[in-house]
Amino acid sequence: MIMPDCPSATCSNFTTCTITHPAITVGAQQKWGKLSTTEPDSVAVDFREDPIGAARQGTNPTVLGRMSTGWAIMANTQHLPGYCILMYDGDADQLTELPVDERVAFMRDVVLLGEAVERACRAVDSGFLRINYEVLGNTWPHLHGHVHARYWWEPEELRIGPVYLYGAQRADPQHQLDSRHNDLRTRIAESLRQVLDEN
């Protein structure tokens, strides 16, 4: 799934199935409506047009798994390998629109997704450093959280700041989510299942 040109990056996602998914190349400037009204048993929707509706239908190839408050997805850009997003599966533009218990549940899900990303990325890259978290929504007016893996091998002047400092290079076609990322995607999905089982 691709998040519209979110200020934190172009977003995307994959499924927790064992199928090897084809490359996903969707433009970074796509805009979505506020909330999907697609139900699981309705006519199939294109995940690039309605990522949440497609996730509900099981047709969004970037979904990693369903969490208590939304859908964990692999982002469309993998400039920093392991970049994932949690899309809230409800009607909210920002955290303060939710009751306090739902806010806490959403943030808990973001942190659990981050733990899964950390486990997977640490296992495949000795340069893994930490996880950064963001909840922005300035471009796509729907609640979603960003989980960024960070690495020691990043240039120091960029490593010590927020991911957005990378600018346009994050959306370079060479970083697009595709079959090169299947192993990492599978590892993150497996780690997510383990983290959810443990919590």
Image: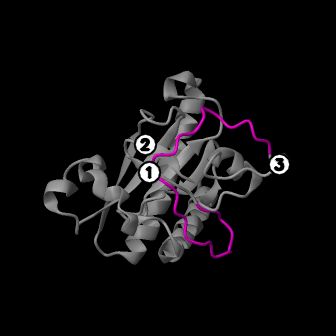
Q: Amino acid at mark 2?
A: Cys
Residue count near mark 3 (Cα–Cα under 10 Å), binned few <14, some 14–19, many ≥20: few
Residue found 39% across the figure and 42% down from its top: 134
Q: Amino acid at mark 3?
A: Val
Would residue 101 be counted in the magenta stretch? Answer: no
Residue range (magenta): 14-39
Task: Give the main secondary structure, helix, strand or loop, of the magenta stretch.
Answer: loop
Dot 2 corresponds to which residue? Answer: 6
Residue found 29% across the figure and 47% down from its top: 164
Residue found 79% across the figure and 42% down from its top: 39
Residue found 45% across the figure and 34% down from its top: 137
Dot 1 corresponds to which residue? Answer: 10
Dot 3 corresponds to which residue? Answer: 43
Q: CA gap, disc 3 to disc 1?
A: 26 Å
Residue count near mark 1 (Cα–Cα under 10 Å), binned few <14, some 14–19, many ≥20: many
Q: Amino acid at mark 1?
A: Thr
Q: Earlier in the sequence, mark 3 or mark 1?
A: 1
